[in-house]
């Protein structure tokens, strides 16, 4: 088996003449926390949408665990154990926190199409759901309607729901965006904890988070890979420094 | 499921029991035909609500299922000579199949496009209903006999017919209730709340939407087939887009996404229409329009929805 769990070859996405992603060859090593950074508009989220099949690529191929998944439906890719999050916290706001996690667990019961069965049949998942909530420190919120929870907690819930699928690889789109210091510290710890035995690819603006969390970093600008390496290598790369200084997003990079 | 909602849910069996008893004694106090009309439209609206309120899909062509099932049931009973229960079953199944076709075509799109495709398809059904001679064009399908249930019970008796309609309503209502509160319903709600997230958790959301669409169409058909027997007529107005609009009005007025709202909405609209038809004539349409605007502007949760919110607030304080 290859050392790389996810690979893209010549990945390209055109939006009516505007090339958002251009010939990106990304290799994510199994077990790594891999960061995708770059100024706003560099194409990070588009790469996310492409590899998780939410957008079809214009050219190039995507390989997950050595298999070509370029033409696959997004739900099928998710079932392979390759699960993404979203930039805006991806929860089901009017369900309770416990129910949110159960949605992630439910598929393995194989009853998701059973409209004639009582929902009480889902209660057997409650212990497992509570264990997941405990892992992200949300047990006290189990019965809360998700919409009423603070933002930082929603991101934790999102991670718990993703973990319910026991994914081999998780994609996190700006997991610390819009958070205060305390919440950031909590989420960083959480990511470190859940990264055991799995691979994580994350888009992140906060460079201090990237510096102390990620094994490898890919820098994107204008849809292309500018540099790749460890934080030390990348942060000393003159091209990278120039890209950050040259953009309006210097602040983004450091706050 | 915070505490006040649990409180409401714990009272629900009691409420259902009370309504069931009310349904049993109602024909002795109120004109049965009027009640049957309410139950038929109530089931129609509940079926519609399953789709809009719990799957977030706005179908603007539900009249096609109501009307088609009415025609199929009418033709089967009048011309083929089957017993009423077989006629209703045939109507329900045909609406379900039509729902499969509509759903399969419409679910490829979302939002306004979804609504427009369902409307266009329903208009095609309306056009067919006018053109084909079997459906009787503008006159509709007249002189449908109520017949004998299972070949035994004479349904020309209004009270007997009422209890059949009531039983059918209860069955349909139970199917909807169960669907909403099932593992399937749980995923349906997840899709309504956040579709991309449901996909990213590995659910083929279109399959869920299609199944919900078929169940909703079949139950709307069950209401239409039953209605044909009640009035001994399958009318062209049941496939008209007015009927598709009316069911939206009933559902919103009663309370979108509440279990009893559509029934309350249907009862209100049917009662108003019956009361006003004699006194104001075609002004009914204007009054309905005004009610709709008032509802959307000032109590958007609908009658049952507002009531629930009120109980919830008082429960919290």
Image (spheres, rainbow, N blue to C red):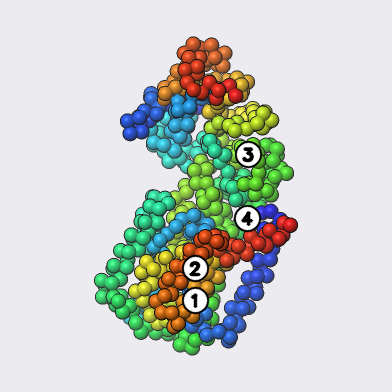
Label 4, on which residue? Answer: A121
Question: Eyeballing the image, is B138 above or below B48?
Answer: below
Q: Position of residue B180 (x, y in %)?
A: 56, 59
Q: Crowding at label 3, few (<14), some or many (≥20) Cα neighbours within 10 Å? A: some
Question: Eyeballing the image, is A254 above or below A144?
Answer: above
Query: Element type at marker 3?
Result: helix
Mark 3 or 1, closer to the camera: 1
- Distance of mark 1 from mark 2, alpha carbons? 11 Å
Tell whether label 2 touches label 1 (CB within 8 Å).
yes
Query: Element type at marker 2?
Result: helix
Label 2, on which residue? Answer: B291
- Distance of mark 1 from mark 4, alpha carbons? 42 Å
Mark 4 or 3, closer to the camera: 3
Chain bearing mark 2: B
Labels 4 and 2 positioned on one and the same chain: no
Quarter of the image with the C terminus of chain B is bottom right
* Residue plotted at (55% across, 23% down): A251
Residue A151: image tag:
3
* Residue plotted at (37% across, 66% down): B241
Q: Nearer the viewer, residue B120 or B93?
A: B120
**Total number of numbered discs in the rendering:** 4
Label 1, on which residue? Answer: B272
Chain bearing mark 4: A
Q: Position of residue A100 (x, y in %)?
A: 61, 46
């Amino acid at each position: 088996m290859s050392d790389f769990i996810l690979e893209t070859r010549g990945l390209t996405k055109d939006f009516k003449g505007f090339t958002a992603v251009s010939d990106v060859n990304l290799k994510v090593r199994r077990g790594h926390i891999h960061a995708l950074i770059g100024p706003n508009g560099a194409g990070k989220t588009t790469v996310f949408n492409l590899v998780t099949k939410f957008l079809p690529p214009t050219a190039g191929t995507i390989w997950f665990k050595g298999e070509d998944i370029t033409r696959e439906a997004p739900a099928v890719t998710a079932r392979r154990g390759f699960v993404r999050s979203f930039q805006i916290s991806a929860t089901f706001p009017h369900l309770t926190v416990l129910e949110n996690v159960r949605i992630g667990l439910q598929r393995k019961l194989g009853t998701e199409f059973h409209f004639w069965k009582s929902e009480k049949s889902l209660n057997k998942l409650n212990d497992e759901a509570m264990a997941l909530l405990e892992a992200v420190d949300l047990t006290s919120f189990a019965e809360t309607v998700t919409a009423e929870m603070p933002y930082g907690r929603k991101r934790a819930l999102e991670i718990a729901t993703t973990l319910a699928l026991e994914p081999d690889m998780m994609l996190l789109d700006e997991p610390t965006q819009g958070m205060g210091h305390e919440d950031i510290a909590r989420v960083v710890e959480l990511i470190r904890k859940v990264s055991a035995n799995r691979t994580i690819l994350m888009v992140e603006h906060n460079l201090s988070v990237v510096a102390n969390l990620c094994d490898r970093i890919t820098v994107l600008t204008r849809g292309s890979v500018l540099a790749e390496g460890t934080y030390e290598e990348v942060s000393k790369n003159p091209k990278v420094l120039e890209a950050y200084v040259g953009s309006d997003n210097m602040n983004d990079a450091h706050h | 499921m915070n505490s006040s909602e649990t409180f409401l849910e714990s009272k629900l069996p009691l409420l259902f029991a009370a309504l069931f008893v009310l349904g049993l004694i109602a024909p002795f106090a109120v004109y049965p035909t009027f009640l049957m009309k309410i139950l038929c439209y109530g089931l129609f609206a509940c079926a519609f609500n399953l789709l809009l309120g719990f799957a977030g899909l706005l179908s603007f062509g539900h009249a096609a299922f109501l009307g088609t099932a009415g025609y199929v049931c009418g033709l089967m009973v009048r011309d083929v000579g089957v017993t009423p229960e077989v006629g209703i079953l045939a109507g329900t199944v045909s609406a379900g199949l039509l729902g499969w076709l509509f759903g399969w075509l419409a679910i490829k799109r979302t939002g306004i496009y979804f609504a427009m495709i369902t409307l266009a398809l329903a208009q095609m059904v309306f056009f067919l209903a006018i053109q084909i001679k079997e459906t009787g064009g503008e006159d509709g399908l007249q002189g449908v006999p109520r017949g004998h249930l299972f070949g035994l019970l004479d349904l020309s008796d209004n009270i007997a017919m009422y209890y059949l309609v009531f039983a059918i309503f209860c069955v349909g209502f139970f199917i909807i209730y169960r669907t909403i509160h099932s593992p399937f319903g749980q995923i349906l709600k997840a899709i309504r709340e956040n579709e991309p997230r449901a996909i990213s958790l590995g659910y083929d959301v279109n399959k869920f939407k299609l199944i919900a669409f078929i169940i909703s169409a079949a139950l709307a058909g069950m209401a239409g087939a039953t209605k044909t027997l009640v009035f001994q007529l399958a009318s062209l107005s049941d496939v008209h887009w007015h009927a598709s609009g009316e069911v939206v009005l009933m559902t919103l007025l009663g309370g979108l996404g509440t279990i009893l709202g559509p029934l309350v909405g249907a009862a209100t609209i049917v009662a108003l229409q019956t009361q006003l038809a004699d006194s104001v004539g075609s002004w009914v349409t204007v009054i309905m329009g005004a009610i709709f605007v008032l509802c959307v502007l000032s109590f958007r949760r609908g009658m049952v929805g507002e009531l629930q919110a009120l109980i919830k607030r008082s429960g919290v304080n």
